[in-house]
Amino acid sequence: MSQSLSSELLHQIAAIVGADNMGLDESSRALSTADIFVWPHAKVADAVVRPTTTKQVAQLVGVLAKHAVPMVPRGAGLSYTAGVVPSVPVVVIDCLHLNQIQIFAEDMYAVVGAGTTWQNLATALKPHGLRAAQISPISGSHSTVGGAASQNLPGGLDHFIGMTVVLADGTVVNTGSAAKQGASPFARYSGPDLTGLFLGDCGAFGIKTELVVRLTVEREAAFASFKFDRHEDMMAALICLRQRELVTRALSMDQLKANAATKVDVEEAMGVAKAVLSESSSVGGALKDLAQLAMGRREIRRASWSLHLTVESVTQTMAEAQMALARAVCKDKGQEMDNMVPKTMRAKPYSIRGLVGPDGERWVPVHAILPLSSAQACMRELLATLESSEPQLKDAGIFYSWIISTIGAYITIEPMFYWNDQLDPLHMKHLSDRNQARFSKFEVNHKARNLVQQVREQMRRVMSAHDAVHGQMGRFYPYLPQLTPGTKDFVQRIKQAMDPHGTMNPGVLGLGPFHV
Ligand SMILES: Cc1cc2nc3c(=O)[nH]c(=O)nc-3n(C[C@H](O)[C@H](O)[C@H](O)COP(=O)(O)OP(=O)(O)OC[C@H]3O[C@@H](n4cnc5c(N)ncnc54)[C@H](O)[C@@H]3O)c2cc1C
């Protein structure tokens, strides 16, 4: 057990959350300040605490503030930018037990605990024919609504319409229309947009305990996929699709990513097949879909670049009509292929399997969210940078692949690195028994780890030179140093006002006295 917290403080915490909701053993404390990358500065937490209500969070934070103990809010810890990895000892506020879901179908919103997973929210909404309007991450089988709201997503956070936040001194704040005493949280805009202040703050400004999520109806969808020989042609099609607003979602992957994505375990493949079949309307349709899954896998593995489109609309005919326009754009330089990928992604949007490579390699991405006009040049420079490091990467056994996507008026470019290396308890926690056994034997690979770190930083610099912004900034992407002078001063003043002792997630976004 950690020696840093007095027994008096531990008793006070136990009186608030109950001793069963405190983790004081070494492995729980180490796990609570880990994400899925490696961070030499990481400090093991003094304690991890699991509150179940906003009231408990407010009391806890009040007590920690009185003792000037730094704290870190945590969702599932499935990020890779050290947002949950402090460089000083802290108490971790694990939000996973804040997981209630209230659905207000008539007014099209849901109020959910910050620790609710996206999958659980989707399951609760399905009987109502509704879903979250907010785009959610692929890790949503396990990652939380509060984690996404706190660190931004490439598709934006526009559909969070309110929240409840506990500030660093225990003050409880409501945003959106619920800021007005006795009002319901049905609308985001009423006076200054306080919700926006906390979105993407990586927990620097407070602990979100509840989020209000706008709901939307399930829509009909049309799907199409294309293969391209050259990344420039794929990117040109992607940009044109976005500029003409022809698709709801578009995602491209290179051949290596396609191989990795289709080389899944038996268990995962069964899950995908089951999800696709559950969307089929007849036995004949189901058999056709199964055959398509197998054929689609073969076809995508042969494409240098594949581009996968989804159009959603009110009726199937309208979705198909819009897809016909998108098809005309892609057929200029691309060839249509099987549409198994977008179909599968809609049927099974969440999966945790990608947290390691197909053969248990460690995995880490880095990404740029770019203006449409900068995407081609940034991609060229990223490719050239990686090509210049190719001999060292090969020598260290590191390989990389790409996902390029668009939701909203920008392009997200995401190179991802894979290498053989020892996996951490956080990886193991999310692997099947079979894969835990298969992937538990790797030795620590310092050489590859260090090189990935260097190359990832190089990529980040190239991205920055092309005007990139980022989701999940954490302690990896520079935030504060890149602000204009007035903005920098303003953000520091906000932090100072909300967290004068710098105890709320110290160092995240470069804010607070413990900048890493
Ligand atoms: C297989 C896989 C697929 C992924 N796919 C995607 C993807 O499609 N898109 C994408 O953007 N990312 C993706 N990610 C990255 C990551 O999982 C997501 O960004 C996810 O939203 C993180 O949520 P979390 O609950 O794990 O948050 P955490 O990692 O626990 O926390 C993230 C940040 O939010 C803060 N935070 C968490 N909860 C709160 C709270 N209640 N109040 C205040 N601050 C809080 C933390 O302090 C930290 O700074 C993926 C990761 C994996 C492993």
Image: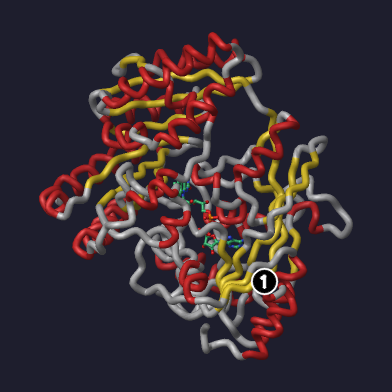
Question: Residue 10 is drawn in which quadrant?
Answer: bottom right
Residue 25 is situated, as x and y percent measured from the top left of the image, at 52, 76
The residue lying at 67 percent from left, 90 percent from top is: 8
Left or right relative to 392: residue 491: right
Left or right relative to 262: residue 146: right
Residue 251 is situated, as x and y percent measured from the top left of the image, at 41, 32
In the depicted view, which residue is nearer to us: 463 or 168? 168
Residue type marked 1: Asp
What is the number of callouts on the image?
1
Q: Quadrant of the C terminus?
A: bottom left
Residue 441 appears in the figure? yes
Q: What is the crowding at mark 1: few (fewer than 14 residues within 10 Å), some, or many (at least 20)?
A: few
Question: Residue 235 is drawn in which quadrant?
Answer: top left
Q: Is residue 319 above or below residue 352?
A: above
In the depicted view, which residue is nearer to us: 331 or 436? 436
Left or right relative to 202: residue 99: right
Q: Which residue is mark 1?
A: 20
Residue 490 appears in the figure? no
Residue 84 is situated, as x and y percent measured from the top left of the image, at 49, 66
In the depicted view, which residue is nearer to us: 338 or 366? 338
Residue 72 is situated, as x and y percent measured from the top left of the image, at 55, 71
The residue lying at 37 percent from left, 26 percent from top is: 307
Q: How is the image coloured?
A: secondary structure
Secondary structure at numbered mark 1: helix
Question: Residue 63 is drawn in which quadrant?
Answer: bottom right
Ligand 1 closer than 8 Å to label 1 CB: no
The residue lying at 65 percent from left, 51 percent from top is: 116
Q: Is residue 385 above or below residue 508?
A: above
